[in-house]
Image (tube, rainbow, N blue to C red):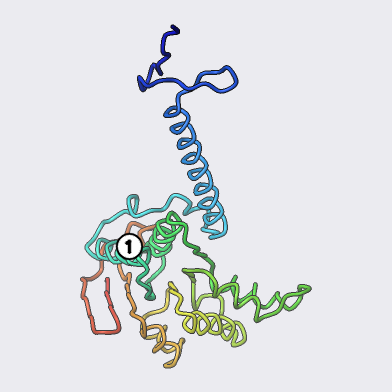
Amino acid sequence: MNAIELCSIHKIKMDSYRGKSFCKQCSLESLDRGQKEHHHNVNTMVRDKHFAGAKLPPRHNDSGFGNYQVLNNGQQNAKAQCAAFAKDFIGDVVRNLIMVGRTGTGKTHLACAIARNVLDKCKYARYITSEDMANEIAKAWTIADDNEANAIQRFTDYDLLILDEYGLHDRHENRLLLIHKVLYSRYDEGKATMLISNLTLDELQKDLGDRLWSRFQHDGLTLVECNWADQRNQGDELSNNSILMNSNIHINRVQ
């Protein structure tokens, strides 16, 4: 009588196919590992594609909440509000975020930290300056099979649009109109938008106009004012914090 061959790992009887012995459990585990590896590779490929499509500034490729330097209460509050926004967005809570304040206060770093968290969950995000977006839409008319409406829709399709340097190089009326068309379109489709500007809150509200400002608040708005000194010049903290809230707008004023 032939001895029963057992799997050295699972201690179960080996099966035979075309004269070769194999363990069913080992085969199933190998298949499962292959499926998991394939799933991981697909997720990695999708994640890498999303990061590339977001076009984050190379300087901020590694900018996250963990390496955001906190030197005052205002920065701590701003970091907390941006981290909460990212967490809520990943959880499908859609609202807008406006971040205003003087140059060198870390606004773009925080925006890219939000983007990295969003992209890591395979959502679509896009970073672009206001000037570059206006230029891209305007150039659509010079490209075959493209036009302004298509360009606006492309910026509307992103789950999260991060529009930086609003009010800096977009002062021409026609350029501003193109930017506002994107903002209106994203509102109509219920998409979240982050608007970053060196304008004061009052200046920004006036620039957007009553109708667009109202739409920014409609689904909820996180507002962060970064009014501490330029950290690139290692300035000192200038003022304190305050928080204002109501049913439609969540305003966090960080100064």
Residue 252: image quadrant is bottom left
**Residue at the location (22% across, 63% down)?**
73
Viewer-side residue, 13 vs 32: 13
- How many numbered marks have been drawn onto this rendered protein structure? 1
Viewer-side residue, 131 vs 219: 219
**Residue at the location (45% across, 24% down)?**
23
**Secondary structure of the residue carrying numbered label 1:** helix
Other-residue count near label 1 (Cα within 10 Å), few / some / many at <14 / 14–19 / ≥20? some
Q: Which residue is mark 1?
A: 87
Give, as a three-letter code, the residue at label 1.
Lys
Residue 200, position as x, y percentages in the image: 38, 80
Q: Is residue 96 above or below residue 31?
A: below
Residue 164: in sight, yes or no?
no
Left or right, 63 with reference to 148: left
Q: Is residue 133 above or below residue 11?
A: below
Left or right, 197 with reference to 175: left
Quarter of the image containing the N terminus?
A: top left
Q: Is residue 205 above or below residue 108?
A: below
Residue 222: in sight, yes or no?
yes
